[in-house]
């Protein structure tokens, strides 16, 4: 039986996990084993925690190089000066206190035949099952001129932390009357609506501090998630402050020159005052090292067990996997982490694994007190997840009270998912 899909359930990602993880006593007897999780973000931390909570005899190790995780959701508010970055940061003490061994290093090598992971200090760990949740890395070959050095001049701010603060400082330093360009990649990419949320919140910052300025979106797509809701909000809140050049208008960015801060598109060149360049993406590099990526750069999986189609005993969750209809979001990663934990526990105990029903909810805040959302349900279909009935999008024509309520719900969603994952 699946839990009904409410936004609260979607927040907790519990449609399958809650029911199937409710039989831990059987698991204790049968499934002592070693599970190593690589990546302590929304997917990996949720998975490690669900594994340990359901299978007390499991030896669960989480490998994550950062002592403090900086969350991307709500990082657009940090960029717009509406929030301190400290509110985005979470440690691993609680996970460690629950019996998860937390190793503060990067995983550098995976040998699937020997079932070992090597960490940056050269130590090897053996596993029975390995979970990869390394998030994204950038596909620099897909954007000539852009690399780590270029990101210091034209920040992506697509991994939260120093890049988030750099973009904020650049906005603060810009003169009134300037242009902020946001280069948006094609899908699949991390959190498809987030570039438009960012454009909105930067417009809010400019409207209140530098009202003669503009936001220019250079887009490798024609349509985008929740487009009608965004465009209505832009008109209502920001007039003509935000301009978008879509793919069919030549908006796709083909190269950049960081020395002159030039963005080259299929239509022409732009030299904005602030250039936020979000490059094309692929699975975190360790997934490629493990041999779990295909030619797309992402990881094909069995969507029932999250096991890699390319590497045995290795599971991939979160942004790194090829999920089909399920968006690359924190909400989905958390839901996948729990369902993957459930699958691993079943596999270690020799039980058949039930197909999961995943949930995802995505809130967008376009100004303080103005939010909307999209909630969806997903089930395995063939090699991917397909969206199934029961999802909900905010109505386009809604009173401002609903927008204010959804903005407050968004903040509650963040509190809930971060407490559920790290707290
Ligand atoms: C601006 C922005 C706004 C967003 N807003 C939302 C939102 O409102 N709602 C929402 O649901 N989602 C949102 N997202 C998306 C969300 O942040 C991601 O989808 C989510 O973090 C994916 O979880 P993950 O576990 O796959 O990766 P991550 O959370 O990125 O975690 C990956 C972890 O793996 C670690 N790692 C990488 N390589 C290694 C290695 N070799 N060894 C050990 N560890 C490694 C990294 O250090 C990192 O901690 C947003 C994203 C952005 C950029």
Image: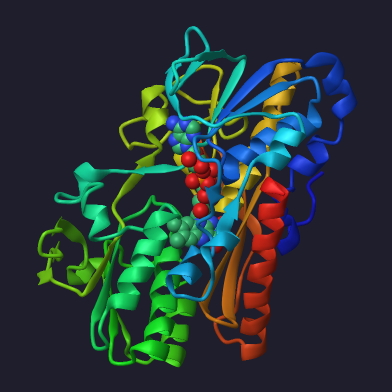
Q: Is residue 6 visible?
A: no
x then y, percent, for residue 152: 26, 56
Structure colour scheme? rainbow
Whether residue 116 sits left or right of residue 341 in the image: it is: left
x then y, percent, for residue 352: 73, 22
In the rendered image, the vertical position of residue 328 relative to residue 221, given as above or below: above
x then y, percent, for residue 251: 21, 68
In the rendered image, the vertical position of residue 58 relative to residue 284, given as above or below: above
Residue 312 versus residue 83: which sits nearer the camera? 83
Residue 413 versus residue 14: which sits nearer the camera? 413
Residue at screen point 49% across, 63% down? 75
| Tally of numbered discs | 0
In the rendered image, the vertical position of residue 61 relative to residue 236, given as above or below: above
Whether residue 66 sits left or right of residue 188 in the image: it is: right
Whether residue 148 sits left or right of residue 191 in the image: it is: left
Furthest residue in direction right, as rendered: 25
Residue 225 versus residue 203: which sits nearer the camera? 203
Instruction: Give the quarter of the figure containing the N terminus.
Output: top right
Residue at screen point 61% across, 86% down? 398
Q: Is residue 162 visible?
A: yes
Residue at screen point 82% across, 41% down? 19
């Amino acid at each position: 039986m699946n839990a009904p899909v409410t936004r609260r359930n979607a927040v907790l990602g519990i449609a399958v996990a809650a029911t199937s993880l409710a039989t831990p006593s059987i698991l204790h007897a049968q499934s002592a084993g070693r599970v190593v999780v690589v990546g302590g973000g929304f997917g990996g931390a949720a998975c490690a925690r669900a594994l340990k909570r359901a299978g007390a005899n499991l030896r669960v190790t989480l490998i994550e190089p950062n002592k403090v995780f900086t969350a991307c959701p709500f990082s657009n508010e940090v960029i717009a000066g509406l929030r301190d970055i400290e509110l985005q940061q979470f440690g691993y003490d609680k996970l460690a206190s629950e019996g998860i061994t937390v190793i503060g290093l990067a995983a550098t090598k995976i040998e699937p035949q020997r079932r070992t992971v090597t960490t940056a200090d050269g130590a090897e760990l053996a596993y029975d099952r390995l979970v990869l949740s390394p998030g994204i890395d950038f596909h620099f070959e897909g954007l000539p001129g852009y690399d780590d050095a270029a990101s210091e001049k034209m920040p992506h701010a697509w991994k939260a932390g120093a890049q988030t603060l750099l973009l904020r400082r650049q906005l603060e330093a810009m003169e009134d009357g300037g242009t902020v360009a946001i280069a948006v990649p094609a899908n699949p990419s991390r959190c498809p609506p987030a570039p438009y949320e960012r454009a909105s919140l930067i417009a809010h910052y400019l409207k209140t501090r530098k009202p003669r300025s503009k936001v220019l979106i250079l887009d490798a797509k024609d349509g985008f998630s929740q487009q009608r809701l965004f465009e209505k909000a832009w008109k209502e809140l920001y007039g003509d402050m935000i301009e978008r050049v879509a793919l069919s208008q030549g908006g796709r960015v083909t190269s950049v020159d960081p020395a002159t801060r030039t963005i080259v598109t299929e239509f022409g060149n732009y030299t904005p005052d602030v250039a936020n360049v979000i490059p094309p993406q692929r699975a975190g590099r360790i997934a490629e090292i493990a041999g779990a990526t295909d030619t797309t750069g992402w990881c094909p999986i069995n969507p029932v067990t999250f096991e890699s189609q390319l590497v045995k005993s290795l599971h991939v969750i979160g942004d790194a996997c090829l999920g089909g209809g399920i968006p690359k979001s924190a909400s989905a990663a958390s839901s996948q982490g729990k369902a993957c934990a459930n699958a691993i526990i079943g596999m270690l105990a020799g039980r058949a694994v039930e197909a999961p029903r995943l949930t995802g909810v995505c809130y967008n805040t376009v100004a303080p007190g103005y939010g909307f959302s999209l909630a969806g349900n997903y089930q395995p279909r063939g090699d991917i997840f397909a969206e199934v009935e029961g999802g909900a999008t905010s109505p386009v024509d809604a009173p401002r009270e609903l927008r204010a309520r959804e903005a407050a719900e968004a903040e509650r969603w963040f509190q809930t998912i971060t407490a559920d994952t790290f707290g």
